[in-house]
Image: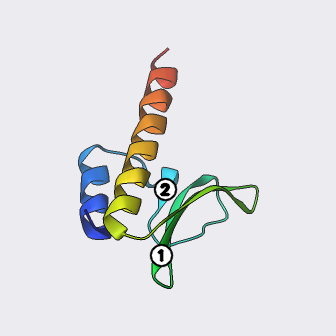
Amino acid sequence: MNLKELKKKLDEQNVPTDMYSLNGWNPNEMMCIERKGQKWQVYCSERGMKTGMKIFKREVDACQYLYNIVMLCYRDRKEYLQK
């Protein structure tokens, strides 16, 4: 999947856009994906820093990783709010 397909999948799952950024670093607490040269970075923007960074050679791998992480967090958030 590419960024466009990733956005579509997240929208289909009704994931709030405040949980992720597909446009690189964001100062808010969220998961981010960013292309740097020939590589892709996926990380959590936390307190103005990039934490837990993973680097991928392929867009498809980076997008799948971000999707998996965001969906785990989203499910946890929904369960917490339903209590």
In the displayed structure, does residue 83 sit left or right of residue 12? right
Secondary structure of the residue carrying numbered label 2: strand
Q: 38 or 27: nearer the eye?
A: 38
Residue that numbered label 1 is attached to: 39
> Are the residues tagged 2 and 1 within 8 Å (C-beta)?
no
Q: In x, y percent, where is residue 77?
A: 49, 31
Secondary structure of the residue carrying numbered label 1: strand
Q: Residue furthest front?
A: 57
Where is 39 relative to 20, above or below? Answer: below
Which corner quadrant of the image does residue 46 belong to?
bottom right
Which corner quadrant of the image does residue 44 belong to?
bottom right
Foreground label between 2 and 1: 1
Q: 4 or 38: nearer the eye?
A: 38
Which corner quadrant of the image does residue 64 belong to?
bottom left
Residue that numbered label 2 is attached to: 20
Q: Residues within 10 Å of mark 2 (few under 14, many from 20)?
A: many
Residue drawn where x is 31% and y is 64% of the image? 60
Q: In x, y percent, where is residue 43?
A: 58, 58
* Quadrant of the frame with the N terminus: bottom left
In the displayed structure, does residue 55 sit left or right of residue 4? right
Q: Which residue type does callout 2 highlight? A: Tyr
Residue drawn where x is 37% and y is 46% of the image? 15
Q: Which residue type does callout 1 highlight? A: Lys
Q: In x, y percent, where is residue 39?
A: 48, 76
